[in-house]
Image (spheres, grey):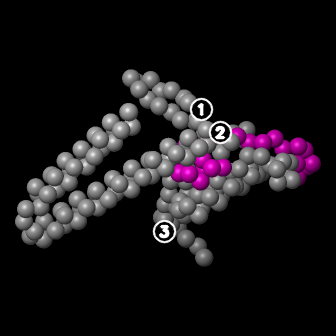
């Protein structure tokens, strides 16, 4: 079956691009690859598969294919990936966090558990934000259909979510 790239979903386009990059990497490897959220458009099954492939490609000697076609020793390749998903973090050898304060960025070495905990917190915040957004959207739809008095309810929801956020910030600082 033939498809135009425009017919593919974001995740499918990402997989096609990664397949091309990994195919080139096997033929003519570079010493390192830099990926910025390559797993963003993928579901968890594909993220885990990509993480496994990166781990395998990064250390070829672990799979017994430490030699290329000519019998020469193949060196391992370094993959530098930014991600906000747990699958790549779980497969990583090292994890770093970057903080930004007063217009200065700082790099911090994190344990794998700390990195996974950070991502879990981000994901739970996203889910909570999604629930508030969904609730606000459904009330907006109801008000456009003639439901009266929902504007004040939306303000209360927005105010409540801001209060909750302020309370969470205080708890995180304590």
Question: Does dot 3 land on a helix, a strand or a loop?
Answer: helix
Q: CA distance from mark 1 to mark 3?
A: 41 Å
Q: Position of residue 154 (x, y in %)?
A: 16, 56
Residue topped by disc 3: 7
| Image coordinates for residue 95, horizontal then vertical, percent | 61, 39
* CB atoms of marks 2 and 1 within 8 Å: yes
The stretch of residues the image draws in magenta is: 67-91
Question: Counting residues from the N terminus, which is met first, the one under dot 2 or under dot 1?
Answer: 2
Distance from label 2 to label 1 (Cα)? Answer: 8 Å
Q: Which residue is mark 2?
A: 94
Mark with earlier residue (2, 3) = 3
> Mark 2 and 3 residues: CB-CB less than 8 Å, in contact?
no
Q: Which residue is mark 1?
A: 109
Residue 53 magenta: no
Q: Is residue 99 above or below residue 91?
A: above
Note whether residue 137 is visible: yes
- Placement of the N terminus among the 4 image quadrants: bottom right
Few, some or many residues within 10 Å of mark 1 (<14, 14–19, 20+): few
Mark 1 / mark 3, whichever is N-terminal: 3
Residue furthest to the bottom: 1
Image quadrant in which the C terminus is located? top left
The residue sitting at 73% across, 38% down in the picture is 31
């Amino acid at each position: 079956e033939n498809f135009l790239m425009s017919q593919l979903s974001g995740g499918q386009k990402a997989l096609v691009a990664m397949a091309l990059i990994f195919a080139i990497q096997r033929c003519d490897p570079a010493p390192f690859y830099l990926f910025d959220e390559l797993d963003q458009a993928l579901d968890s099954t594909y993220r885990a598969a990509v993480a496994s492939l990166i781990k395998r490609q990064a250390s070829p000697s672990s799979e017994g294919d430490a030699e290329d076609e000519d019998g020469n020793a193949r060196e391992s390749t370094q993959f530098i990936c930014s991600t906000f998903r747990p699958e790549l973090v779980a497969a990583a050898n090292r994890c770093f966090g970057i903080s930004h304060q007063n217009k200065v960025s700082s790099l911090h070495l994190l344990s794998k558990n700390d990195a996974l905990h950070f991502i879990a917190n981000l994901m739970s915040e996203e889910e909570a934000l999604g629930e508030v957004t969904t609730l606000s959207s459904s009330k907006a739809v109801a008000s456009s259909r003639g439901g009266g008095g929902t504007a004040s309810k939306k303000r209360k929801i927005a105010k409540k979510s801001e209060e909750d956020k302020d309370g969470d910030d205080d708890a995180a600082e304590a």
